[in-house]
Amino acid sequence: MQILGTATPLILVVLSPYTDKISNDKNLLLMQVLLAFIGSLLLTISAKVQIPFYPVPMTMQTLVVLMIGMSYGAPLAASTIFLYLLQGAIGLPVFASGGGLAYMMGPTGGYLVGFFLSASLLGLLASNGWGKTWQTTAVAMIIGVGLIFAIGIGWLAMFIGFEAAFINGFLPFIYADFLKIIIASFAMPAAWSVVNRFLK
């Protein structure tokens, strides 16, 4: 059973029993602001928590970025990542090692830009029906991770050169991100299955 059509992101399907009862545009906006705030909070937590992994400790931030994109849809995902970046820009310590404009313009700033573009693109894919099978989810996640790395490495290369950027900004993280792609590829279809079952 397809709930609200194939182009409806997961979070809107989950909330559809409640949003159907909301006729006030102001209340809908408040709900979206709340979802964006929750997403930015999850991003902050995921940046701070480190899990022992090979060859470097793993954070879950990339996975959260990708899942926000696939679950929220493009407009809300973009707004959520923008809110997160805004919090960092004003100096809140939401990033892995602090916050502030200087941090954002530093060597790892490209990954932050990649977060925004990746979540927006995956949100667009989700709004076109991706994410309901492991195949479309896996392809979307590979595209999303690839975009983050492409921008992150390109930005980092301006500081340390391409070869060093590739060695230090890609190779140590590829195993962890491969694992995240696998996790997401099963998590998204499983979430859709649960939602479809409960909202029949």
Image (tube, rainbow, N blue to C red):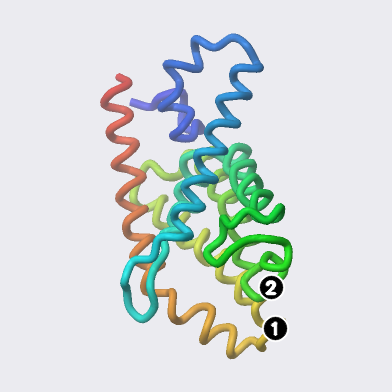
Q: Which mark is residue 54?
A: none
Note whether residue 62 is visible: no
Task: Find numbered disc 2 in the image and state the secondary structure of the residue it sits on.
Answer: loop
- Quadrant of the frame with the N terminus: top left
First along the sequence among labels 2 and 1: 2
Q: Which mark is residue 159?
A: 1
The residue closer to the viewer here, 63 or 56, is 56
Mark 1: secondary structure: helix
Can you tell which quarter of the image residue 111 is in?
Answer: bottom right
The spot of residue 102 in percent (x, y) is 72, 67
**Mark in the foreground, 2 or 1:** 2
Question: Looking at the image, which residue is at 32% across and 21% down?
Answer: 199
Q: Is residue 127 visible?
A: yes
Image location of residue 46, percent across then percent down: 44, 56
Check disc 2 and give the amino acid type. Answer: Gly
Indicate the quadrant where residue 123 lies.
top right
Residue at figure coordinates x 66%, y 68% from the top left: 109
User: Which of the 4 image quadrants contains residue 31?
Assistant: top right
Q: Residues within 10 Å of mark 1 (few under 14, many from 20)?
A: few
**Horizontal side of residue 196 vs 127, given as left or right:** left
Looking at the picture, does residue 175 appear above or below residue 40?
below
**Which is more toward the observer, 134 or 89?**
89
Q: Are marks 2 and 1 in contact (CB under 8 Å)?
A: yes
The spot of residue 121 in percent (x, y) is: 59, 50
> Of the residues shown, which amino acid type is indicated by label 1?
Phe
The residue depicted at 48 percent of the width and 45 percent of the height is 70
Q: Is residue 166 left or right of residue 186?
A: right
Q: CA distance from mark 2 to mark 1?
A: 9 Å
**Residue 150, relative to residue 116: is it above or below?**
below
Q: Which label belongs to residue 106?
A: 2
